[in-house]
Amino acid sequence: MSSYLLQAEGLTIRGEDVTIAPFSCSLTPGGRLTLLGETGSGKSLLAQAIMGTLPKGLVAQGQLVIDGEAFDAADTTSRRALWGHRLALLPQEPWHALDPTMRAVSQIAESHHHVAGRDQRASLQAAWADLKELGLPEAGDKLPGELSGGMAQRVAFAAASAGGAPIVIADEPTKGLDAPRRDAVVELLARTPEAAGALLTITHDIDVARRLGGEVVILRQGQVVERGPAQQVLTHPQSEYGKRLLDAEPSRWPAPAPLGECDMAAVVTANGLAKVRGGRELFRDLSLTVRPGEIVGVVGPSGCGKSTLGDMLLGVTRADEGEVRRAAGHSLGFQKLYQDPPAAFSPHWRLSRLLDDLVRRHRLNRSSIPPLMARLGLDENLLGRRPGEISGGELQRFAILRVLLLNPCFLFADEPTSRLDPITQRQTLALLVELARERRCGVMLVSHDPALIERICDRRITLGNESMSVTKREREPAMA
Amino acid sequence: DRPLSVVAPWEITGADPSTSGYVYARMRVAETLVDTDAAGQPAPGLAESWQVSEDGLAWRFALREGVSFHDGSPLTAQAAAASLEHARAKPGILDSAPIAAIEADGNEVVVQLESPFAPLPALLAHSTTLILAPAAYDDEGRVSQVIGTGPYRVESVAPPQRLGVERFDDYWGEAPAIDSASYLAVGRGETRALMAESGDADVVFTLDPASQTRLARNDRLTLHAEPIPRTIVFKVNAAHPLLEDERARQALSLAIDREGIAAGLLRNPEAAAAELFPASLGSWHLGLDAGEARDLERARELLAELGWQANGNGVLERDGEAFELTLRTFSDRPELPLVATALQDQWRELGVALEVAVGNASEIPSGHRDGSLELGLMARNYGLVPDPLGTLLDDFGADPESMGGDWGAMGWRDTDLAGWLDTLRQEADMEARSELAGQVARRLNEAMPVVPVAWYQQTAAVNAELEGFSIDPLERSYRIDELRWSE
Amino acid sequence: MTTLAMTPPRRWALPALNSRQQIGAALLALLLAFAWLVPWLSDADPARQQLTRILQWPSFAEPLGTDHLGRSLLARLASAVRLSLGMALLSVASAAVPGVLLGVIAGWRGGWLDRVLGSLADACLALPGLLLVLLLVAIAPGNFWALYVGISLVLWIEYFRVVRARTRILVASPQLEASRLLGFGPLYLFRRHLWPELAPQVLTLAAFGAASAILAMAAMGFVSVGLRPPTAELGLMMIELLPYYHEAPWAMAQPILVLFVLVLSLNLLAGRDPR
Amino acid sequence: MSQVLASRTTPRWTTGLGGLLLQRLFQAGLVAWMVGTLTFVLTRSLPGDMAYRIAAGRYGHDMVNTSAAEAVRAELALDQPALGAYFGWLWDLLQFNLGRSLVSGEPVLAELWHQLGHSLGLATMAVLLSLLLGPPLGLIAGLKPNGWLDRVSEVAASVLRALPPFAVGLLLILIFSVSLGWLPAAGHGRSAHGVLPALTLALALAAISSRVARNAMADVSQSAYYAFSRTKGLGERQSFLRHGMRNAAVPVIAYLGVQFVYLIEGVVVVETLFAWPGIGHALVHAIVARDVPMVQGTALVMGLMFVVLNTVVDLLCHWLDPRRRSA
Ligand SMILES: Nc1ncnc2c1ncn2[C@@H]1O[C@H](COP(=O)(O)OP(=O)(O)OP(=O)(O)O)[C@@H](O)[C@H]1O
Ligand SMILES: Nc1ncnc2c1ncn2[C@@H]1O[C@H](COP(=O)(O)OP(=O)(O)OP(=O)(O)O)[C@@H](O)[C@H]1O
Ligand SMILES: [Mg+2]
Ligand SMILES: [Mg+2]
């Protein structure tokens, strides 16, 4: 038994209408365990239960052995001493996890200094080295509020892993990262088991699971539906859900119905946009149009200004130069899905209250809500909770529900499905495409998954990389 | 040579005797031409003797020999006259005397009057007439520092609260035993009492009634109390339609529970005052009993005679007009608002609705001037100088054409009384004077242009290790030069 | 299936109180009950004096004892609570409402408006509050209104500053942006986004603000300003009874105790359970 | 609908440190003018005869009468038109001349100098003491909202806030002077004299600042970044020092600037109770005696003190919260 670095026996989590069934796992030095599964199936809660950081109202039960020491899962305080030194957790919401008043590099350096015990100078050097390794040399001097989603993700990763803990739990470490960055992070994650540590990863990216190897567990509605070596589970899943999960990888999606001929006026037109942020020029002389019903994909490395572009189109952020024209007559027609869903909600109110507010404000038809919720796979129970009390994926779908109720004519979807499992992702995007077509809503979709963009977008805009160049490529040339 | 620390409520406004002379006089820094004796009668001070001319128009004050100021300069008639001239230029006690000129003549200071004024020496005992050295005045005639002739000299002064003095070795009189002393102005009675208890102060003046019993039980302190010629009175606007009739004023007076106020509020049953002048003022005192001065029934009758009838709310009414009055008072003396509150309730029983307005002391004279004052509650000092006549002349004898004295009668005049006062002003014969004094007191007590409520007493808590302490009933001096530390 | 989502929550339902708030509400209710029931149950006159029965220890006839003029402390305290509570709440409201409003406006609009309002607040802050209060009292002597208004003229800045600083950060947050895009107006944004974040600080300030107003009255009384016998007011009662702190400490303790209960109950009411 | 978005730049001087100082300097001037004008207008519109008031202030209530008032009126030329007096004051102010006190006849500046020194000493000591007492307690209480320390400190803060300053001062004198004999009861001159008045003020200040700190800390301690700093492995102490204090300090310090409102109210009481010759005490006397130059001077000095103080507070916040710098 003591040869295990991390072992959980009959770990259960209970709370008000939440039950995560007994979960067991054992990780030897060098072991890797990857949790896949439906959003809201309890992956994050399991990670938190192991750490001992479950939110109020939820309790864990079961036995844990961490690095040879036995713990009672219900006793949350006993594991504190392990944090950072032997047990590291990369939280799911990096933007929230960073101190808003401290520069990125200091947040990493302090881990080196106080956890790993390096001296001040060495810590700072190590922090800069980490940033460079993660492709963020310019982010060190920024405050979290000035980082893009993917940048924050990596900074948090560096800060969490600087202590050199042998057991690492990473909750969706690669969401919001483009392929090269994702691979780099996977490589970094893999170093832990290589150095005889143990790695527990939660991800929706089957590719990541495949690369990491080791054992894979597929969860659904708080139950383990399948587990086994990655090789086997990810190629020949036994369970029906596992099969569906693999089938739902974007690369296997069928292409959507093509956008028919369309001669309606553009919903958004931008001309000669330029923007400088944090001393860096993001784009110059950028022009684009989005037509009703059209789905435009935006790709580009993390931090290249995708979110910024969307904000400029919506009029939330000013452009330094250039102009944006939005179709008239749709005061509520311009909507946004946030990259970081918790940030877009007031944490103080129940979802039912927020939904009700919206219905009242715009005199919406209540009867349209339940079918839409069903299509988004949202359970009614969730409405009784506050935004902080549901999973990231659930909240994102709730955000989609909110937006769709308003019948937008232009939707800027900033990585709307990066927190969703492939099946839900596919359903959700299919729904989005369908509605876009049906309601003639132009969608600008940001994603890091080229395959996904490839599948569902009518057109793709690639934003530049470090060279600051802006390229624009039309996939389907025939668009009047 | 342990320093002495004196604490009292009064703040130091500056260096000028007209504003802060009392502090310098009490701390024995500066002296006046005339002093007082144990009985409170004028006695030689810096002037060894004085004489008045036959016509009563010229007073000659012969100065004491061998007196020097703290700066070493000798006391001359010139210096004394200059000091008095300076005092006369400022508002102060000398305003009440008809002074024509003050001159130096050899070793004598000569005061020329326009009309005879018997109580002049008494005025020259007041602290606004302190004699200061010529060097005390700057070019513009401001007092820049206090250079007096007293047994103590100023060592440090930090207005508004602190004054430090040390012994002046060339003092003409007996040298004091204590080397140095400090004066601290502490406004709150509670703090003063606590300072006495904690030993931070050796002599604490003016104790609040509530702490006196507590301090009396303290072994390390001795408590002293002395009646002083200061009286809590309220003046009445006798021209006011409700108060015109003598009977209305008498009714108000009869409704006052003086003994209750004295025992309950002032914690001194002796303080109940049925007349204006306390026993220390000799022939001015009539010896009336405060208990008999209360008669609620009689008060009701008097008002009924005047046509006042109680309405539904218990308030008196006449021709649809309610008996409503406003009493102005001030809080410089903390007991005044309390007494006002007591009066309010006692008159309410009579059916008089009284509004109490606590404000600034100056609102009484200014209300008197503009006629808006109805009732004013105050503490009147009839012993500002050894002879109350000066004050009375101001209060009741002032020329009848104006409305009366700022702190005295308002809208009231009595030719007899004015005549008596005028006689007193010129009369020097003691017998006749005391006869007249009694007459004045009696008349005032009947007509009630000013109604007495209670008498004051000066109190002090003194460190038990101090010997030789006594209270000056005229509050001219703290007598610190007579104090000694016991062995 | 449309049960949960579609039963619209009642709009102005009483806010659910947590246990702390319940205690606070109970205390406040107790205080109010005391103030309004006493004149019902006892006919003691708060101004009636009995100079022979001063500073008497509580007894059956006088449940709270008598004061330095022999007046019933029970009657006086009840009447003081009625006056002070109303005035204190009034002054808190007249400070908090403009303070919060202007703070939100300044933090929200930013730019020149923010600078102008900020300068105004700083300048008001720099005007010695005491001076304003003293002058107002001198202009309208014996008028409690003037005093309390003067006090709230000084206190609004507190709210303004706290609210402005917080609003400035919140306004830039995605949660507000999201709701704005969804078509909600400023009122909604304030109610759902700003207020929950601002409330703990604002309510804490308000709870103390009520005490500040009453204590400012006491402070004025201490320097003998604003007295108007025989009105019973909590702050003035404290100062009236101060000289008798040694003889009758229980008498002076009474208005202080009442104020303490008031502060504590408001504080408890202000406190929210952590999320 | 079309919308043209043009770039907008703000002039440099309105931002950054230099801008802040410049703005404050301008504000100081504004405050000086406002305070002076307002006090002038208000004191002029006060009911009652000024000459009588001044005479009462000068000569005491035994000696104030009409002739004293008339003498004062003549001496001070109180009959001159208000506008002239106002511009005279303004002109003098431009030359840093605050005039002479109507009561004592001393130059206002000299009197203020004496009093301000005492008040500043007292206030500084009080603020330092309150900083030692209030915020630390609040921060620790905020770490565990609703913990026992939080409850106890809440009740303690309510008690302290409900106690009028004179009651606190009295209690302190009773304990430390009368019973223990450690410190002098009242007076001034030695530094020991300042301890009790400063403590009296500090307790009331600490009551509120502890709650403000507690609220700020409770917010921080429940935030995801605070949780992350702990799971990172910083430990309670380091998390508290590096992330808790830092983030909670901003609202606390911002509040400190405002808190001085309470200080002023307390100062009057405390100065009177402890016989401390301070500016609050002087202001009350000046207003009572209608000593207009003194009122104006005192108010002016107090106002400028606030400006300085707020500048310091702003600078501190600036330094603590880098978001403000870039915003
Ligand atoms: N604080 C909470 N209180 C009550 N229920 C919660 C709370 N947090 C999460 N839940 C519920 O627990 C379930 C599991 O949540 P969890 O966050 O573990 O999901 P997940 O598997 O990580 O999903 P995702 O992939 O979307 O992040 C969800 O149904 C969620 O609604
Ligand atoms: N408020 C801000 N102030 C200054 N710089 C900012 C701010 N927000 C973002 N930036 C910078 O602007 C650049 C673009 O950010 P943006 O969020 O648009 O990137 P993105 O393409 O959406 O990246 P990601 O895929 O990681 O979300 C980044 O370099 C970021 O550091
Ligand atoms: Mg999750
Ligand atoms: Mg982005």
Image: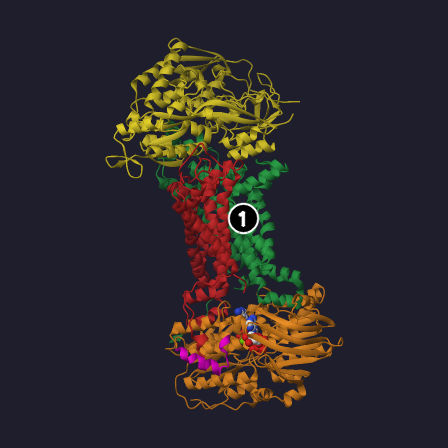
Chain colours: A orange, B yellow, C red, D green
Q: Which residue is drawn at the image coordinates 60% and 55% (left, top)?
A: D149
Q: Nearer the viewer, residue B306 or B421?
A: B306
Q: Position of residue A445 (x, y in %)?
A: 50, 81
The three-letter amino acid code for the residue at tag 1 is Val
Q: Quadrant of the C terminus of chain C?
A: bottom right
Residue A376 is inside the magenta segment: yes
Q: Which residue is mark 1?
A: D159
Query: Is C112 placed above or below A354 here?
Result: above
Q: Position of residue A127 (x, y in %)?
A: 67, 69
Q: Which residues are magenta?
A: A365-381
Q: Nearer the viewer, residue D264 or A429?
A: A429
Query: Is D30 placed above or below D285 here?
Result: below
Q: Quadrant of the N terminus of chain C?
A: bottom left
**Is residue C126 shown left or right of residue B236?**
right
**Is residue A2 shown left or right of residue B281?**
right
Q: Position of residue A36 (x, y in %)?
A: 61, 82
Residue D313 is inside the magenta segment: no
Query: Is C164 placed above or below B247 here?
Result: below
Q: Which residue is drawn at the image coordinates 59% and 66% (left, top)?
A: D225
Query: Is C102 placed above or below D294 here?
Result: below
Q: Nearer the viewer, residue D318 or D106?
A: D318
Could you tell me how many numbered marks the image carries?
1
Q: Position of residue A33 (x, y in %)?
A: 67, 80
